[in-house]
Image (cartoon, helix red, strand yellow):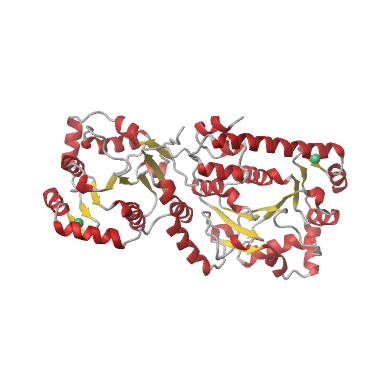
Amino acid sequence: MKPMYAAAPEFATSKTAVWWDMGDCPVPDGYDARRVVPSIEGALKKLDYSGPVSITAYGDLKHTPEHVLRRLSSTGVDLQHTVKELRCSHMYSDLLKWREHNPPPATMMLISDQVQSVFCYGLCRLQQLEHGYNLVQAYAHDPCLLSPLYSTAEWLWESLLSDSEPPTQFILQKCSQTAKSAMLHCRSCGFVGQCLANFTKHLSGEEHAQEETRVTQSTCPSVGPGYEKAKVMRMRINWKNCEAAPEFATSKTLVLWDMGDCPVPDGYDARCVRPSIEGALKKLGYSGPVSITAFGDLKQTPEHVLRRLSSTGIALHHIVEEVRCTLMYTYLMRWARVTPPPGTIMFISDHLESFSIGLCRLQQREHGYNLVLASTHASTHASTQASVIVTSAEWFWETLLTDSETPRQFLLQKCSETGESAVLQCSSCMLDCQNLEMFTKHLSGEKHAKSDFNMIMSTRRRYEHKQSEEENFQRSKRLRKAFRTGFHFGNYFRITNSGSRRRTRFQK
Ligand SMILES: [Zn+2]
Ligand SMILES: [Zn+2]
């Protein structure tokens, strides 16, 4: 099932802008084009959107029948003639311009099949950076994949159109009521007008044909996954960690630390880990409480390391590598459920991309979680990778550990201050331990070894099973990526409100 949430109160009466790709989602043959506007408005109204709606349609209008243009224009649809190659680019730049002039709250509706392939990356980052814009979508073909882009409602174009009543007195009356006359643009030549006869005359003229040939040959699109990523990468060359925004300065910070990716270096005093993390955060102005949970194969971790981490109040979770990311993700989602924003989430991991879809959606859905990252991986830092996830600060793990100027006195005092007993948990056995002796004894036991083995085997079986299913399901490329990176559990899908179709497909 596609998401279909009623308008949140702030969007119920605010404006909605619609960008409609007529190439992907045309007016069907024989369909009265005057029904398009009431269909879109009707679909929105059903979800309680009752604010003003403006619609801009993009397409090759030279080849659109004149009666379609007339009927769209007469119902208040702005028409933009653009060559196919630049259609998405024009839509996206118009969307950006619209956001500049229309502060939130407001709703954006995209009617296009290119959202996943072209808009997703840029729009995802935009939605994380600037909150208060609600997104809804319609498309001719269901992309059938779990997208990092979060929208609150999605329609199939044809069913959206067919849900409306045939034109009636009401619609005709409605049309004549449209105070603002629709605009007609030729994006190739910069022609702007309101008279349809002049517009169609322009589109069929020689001058327009010449200009269009020139435009098609000389311009490359300024929107698309490659372009957007390049833009972010350029930004990242001058990467600088941001100071904590006021709302995060005193709010909670959750640290999820993958000890497999980012271990305590040999010879490093594990008691310095917590003050180093807190020190790095403090330098940026974060002074709220910090809770740190470490995930790793703790059977392989020296006991003195466990003792020192635990003594500084770091919760320790034993988990086999195969499900580490999944457990961390589940843990994060559980935390988010009980910790309303504002809050900061710090990942210490080289696998941020494993979390990207879920994290991205969380960021857009909840607004108000701030992400920071530490990793050993040069490629997640600064210049080389352009993640779809927006972070406000990033560190190299080793630099973070060695940068802190933590006088020993402070450190020891700090440690002894941690009154709470640290959590020691074995996730293979679902077991909580009271003290470290019991914990290490448990980890070296035979019963535990069996649990670890069973956990690994069942994960592999599940993974292989999913993989064979995936091979039969060619379209869901992104989903396949998600599986490879660790999201092959039912709970992931429950958490992210993904479609029931996927759910039934991939659950055992
Ligand atoms: Zn033109
Ligand atoms: Zn165990």
Depth check: 448 or 152 in front? 448
Whether residue 377 is situated above or below residue 184 in the rendered picture: below
Whether residue 33 is visible here, answered yes or no, is: yes
Depth check: 87 or 148 in front? 87
Which corner quadrant of the image does residue 288 belong to? bottom right
User: Which residue is depicted at the point 79% across and 53% down?
Assistant: 310
User: Where does residue 233 sit, x and y in percent of width and height?
Assistant: 50, 63
Depth check: 319 or 363 in front? 319
User: Where does residue 285 sit, x and y in percent of width and height?
Assistant: 60, 65
Position of 263 with respect to 55 (left or right) is right
Q: Quadrant of ligand 1?
A: bottom left
Position of 463 with respect to 220 (left or right) is right
User: Which residue is depicted at the point 65% across and 59% down?
Assistant: 375
Q: Please state, as top left, top right, bottom left or bottom right, where the C terminus lies in the image.
A: top right
User: Where does residue 264 sit, x and y in percent of width and height?
Assistant: 76, 59
Depth check: 139 or 105 in front? 139
Whether residue 189 is visible here, answered yes or no, is: no
Whether residue 370 is situated above or below residue 149 in the rendered picture: below
